[in-house]
Image: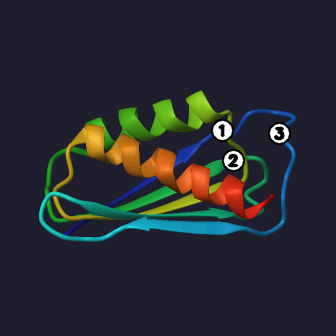
């Protein structure tokens, strides 16, 4: 098992909601579990990835940086348990988690 941790600068001026979380996916063959939480990270974002597939840190960093930038996130913690998902599945699960978080705020 490999643990990867990435920190990203959040988008300045993004409003901070004190609470909220969403969980999507199931760890299994070719899939992953994503938990997204609103936490006070001083405006930044933190992603922690536990994966059974070694050597893809650069790919994880690029996919996660794109997600944070595309969504304009701040004060978000991502916890990912990976069972060998492809980047396309990772993006799908991240978007599902974000939609679930936004839905819970309505």
Residue 44's tag is 2
Discs 3, 1 touching: Cβ within 8 Å = no
Question: Residue at position x 84%, y 65% from top?
Answer: 18
Residue 14's tag is 3
User: Quick one: 22 or 38, which is closer to the camera?
Assistant: 22
Discs 1, 2 touching: Cβ within 8 Å = yes
Q: Secondary structure at mark 3?
A: loop
Question: Residue at position x 52%, y 56% from top?
Answer: 97
For the residue carrying disc 2, how many other residues have a C-alpha within 10 Å: few (<14), some (14-19), or many (20+)?
some
Residue 10's spot in the image, x, y percent?
70, 39
Q: Earlier in the sequence, mark 1 or mark 2?
A: 1
Q: Earlier in the sequence, mark 3 or mark 1?
A: 1
Residue 62's spot in the image, x, y percent?
38, 32
How far apart are the alpha carbons under marks 1 and 2? Answer: 5 Å
How far apart are the alpha carbons under marks 2 and 3? Answer: 10 Å
User: Quick one: 44 or 98, which is closer to the camera?
Assistant: 98
Discs 2, 3 touching: Cβ within 8 Å = no
Quadrant into which the C terminus falls: bottom right
Q: Secondary structure at mark 1?
A: loop
Circle 3 or circle 1, nearest the eye: 3
Position of 29 with respect to 93 (left or right) is: left
Circle 2 or circle 3, nearest the eye: 3
Position of 75 with respect to 90 (left or right) is: right
Q: Quadrant of residue 15?
A: top right
Residue 58's spot in the image, x, y percent?
28, 37
How far apart are the alpha carbons under marks 3 and 1? Answer: 11 Å
Q: Earlier in the sequence, mark 2 or mark 3?
A: 3
User: Quick one: 103 or 72, which is closer to the camera?
Assistant: 103
Q: How is the image coloured?
A: rainbow
**Height in image: 10 above or below 84?**
above
Residue 9's tag is 1
Q: Secondary structure at mark 2?
A: loop
């Amino acid at each position: 098992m490999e643990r990867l941790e990435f920190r990203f600068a959040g988008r300045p001026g993004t409003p901070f909601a004190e609470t909220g979380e969403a969980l999507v996916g199931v760890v299994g063959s070719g899939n992953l579990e994503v938990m997204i939480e609103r936490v006070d990270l001083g405006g930044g974002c933190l992603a922690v990835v536990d994966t059974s597939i070694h050597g893809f840190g650069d790919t994880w960093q690029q996919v996660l940086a794109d997600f944070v930038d595309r969504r304009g996130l701040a004060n978000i913690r991502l916890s990912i348990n990976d069972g060998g998902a492809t980047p396309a599945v990772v993006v799908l699960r991240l978007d599902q988690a974000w939609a679930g978080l936004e839905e819970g705020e309505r």
